[in-house]
């Protein structure tokens, strides 16, 4: 695989791991230390993945792909946490995603 | 849309701090990993980062962000709070384009506007699901 293809895989993996980290931190935010520890562990993984990705990609490419974590977080919030992700919130996430793509052009 | 719902002051302050810390993390992190050849191995990249003070500033801001973020998440929905961090994209773009003396293209400006509209949408929703009528 080319340097860029590896970078793209790394940054998408980083977005997925960040979504899981956010979920774990939310579950630990009311004092459940085990979830916080798991969240930190996921963030540790994300630090390594994103560091390696940034080394191979411009921020302008890494940023919009990293923003897939907003979609991941919205899905996990709804499915796992039972938060109400209605049309307005979903529209907000869609605007953010479209905005990051435009920024990268 | 009707009057925006009340957002607790501690959540507003926490979200603002999160955006500042996110900006510091992004810029310091990039500066911390920019040395060396693009085809360098994983070990060389990580060793290079560990010898770079910017990388440590990024990690310090990361630790502060963790403490701040747990406080925000204790008071607000994850799907409400997390999208606000997208505003750091706007601050990073502004700072990096300023330091590189680049003018912002119309596409980039439209992207910035869309992100602000997106976060604006989310700010109009209740900050916690339990606060819904």
Image: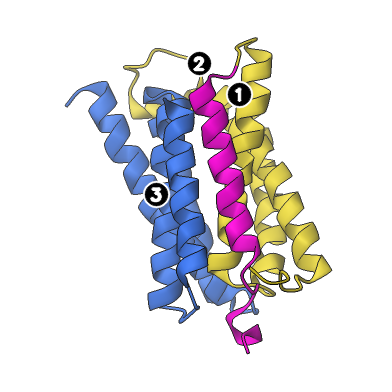
Chain rendered yellow: B
Relative image position of residue B127 (x, y in whole percent): 65, 72
**Residue A11 at what x, y percent from top left?**
36, 39
> Which is nearer the eye, B70 or A103?
A103
Real-space CA distance between mark 2 and mark 1, rounded to the nearest whole angstrom:
9 Å
Residue placed under numbered mark 2 in the picture = B35
> Callout 3: few (<14), some (14-19), or many (20+) C-alpha neighbours within 10 Å?
many
Q: Distance between the residues labelled 3 and 2?
A: 27 Å
Q: On screen, B44 above or below B127? A: above
Q: Which residue is drawn at 68% across and 34% down?
A: B57
* Residue A44 visible in the displayed image: no
Closest to the camera, between mark 2 and mark 1, is 2
Please give left or right for residue B113 compared with residue A66 in the image.
right
Dominant secondary structure, magenta: helix
* Chain to which mark 3 belongs: A
Which color is chain A depicted in? blue
**Cα distance in 3D space between marks 1 and 3:** 29 Å
Q: Quadrant of the C terminus of chain B?
A: bottom right
Host chain of mark 1 = B
For the magenta stretch, what is the residue range?
B104-133
Q: How is the image coloured?
A: by chain
In the picture, the disc for residue B52 is 1
Instruction: Give the residue number, with chain letter if any, for mark 3.
Output: A68
Depicted A25 relative to depicted A97: above or below? below
Q: Residue at x 59, y 59 (%)?
A: B121
The answer, for residue B112, to whether it is visible in the render is yes
Going by the picture, which residue comes out furthest to the front?
A: B1
Label 1 element class: loop
């Amino acid at each position: 695989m080319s340097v860029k293809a590896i970078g793209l895989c790394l940054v998408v993996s980083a977005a997925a791991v960040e979504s899981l980290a956010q979920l774990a931190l939310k579950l630990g935010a009311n004092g459940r230390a085990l979830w916080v520890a798991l969240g930190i562990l996921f963030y540790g993984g994300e630090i390594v993945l994103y560091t390696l990705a940034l080394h191979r990609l411009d921020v302008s490419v890494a940023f919009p792909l990293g923003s897939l974590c907003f979609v991941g977080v919205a899905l996990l919030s709804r499915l796992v946490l039972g938060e109400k992700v209605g049309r307005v919130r979903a529209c907000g996430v869609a605007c953010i995603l479209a905005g990051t793509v435009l920024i990268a052009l | 849309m009707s009057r925006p719902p009340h957002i607790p002051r501690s959540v507003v302050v926490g979200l603002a701090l999160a955006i500042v810390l996110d900006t510091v993390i992004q810029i310091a992190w990039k500066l911390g990993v920019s040395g060396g050849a693009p085809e360098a191995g994983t070990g060389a990249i990580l060793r290079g980062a560990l010898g770079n003070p910017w990388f440590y500033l990024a990690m310090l801001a990361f630790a502060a962000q963790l403490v701040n973020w747990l406080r925000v998440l204790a008071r607000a929905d994850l799907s409400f709070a997390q999208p606000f961090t997208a505003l750091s994209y706007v601050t990073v773009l502004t700072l990096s384009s300023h330091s590189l003396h680049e003018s912002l293209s119309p596409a980039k400006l439209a992207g910035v506007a869309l992100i602000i509209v997106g976060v604006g949408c989310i700010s109009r929703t209740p900050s916690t699901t339990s606060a819904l009528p």
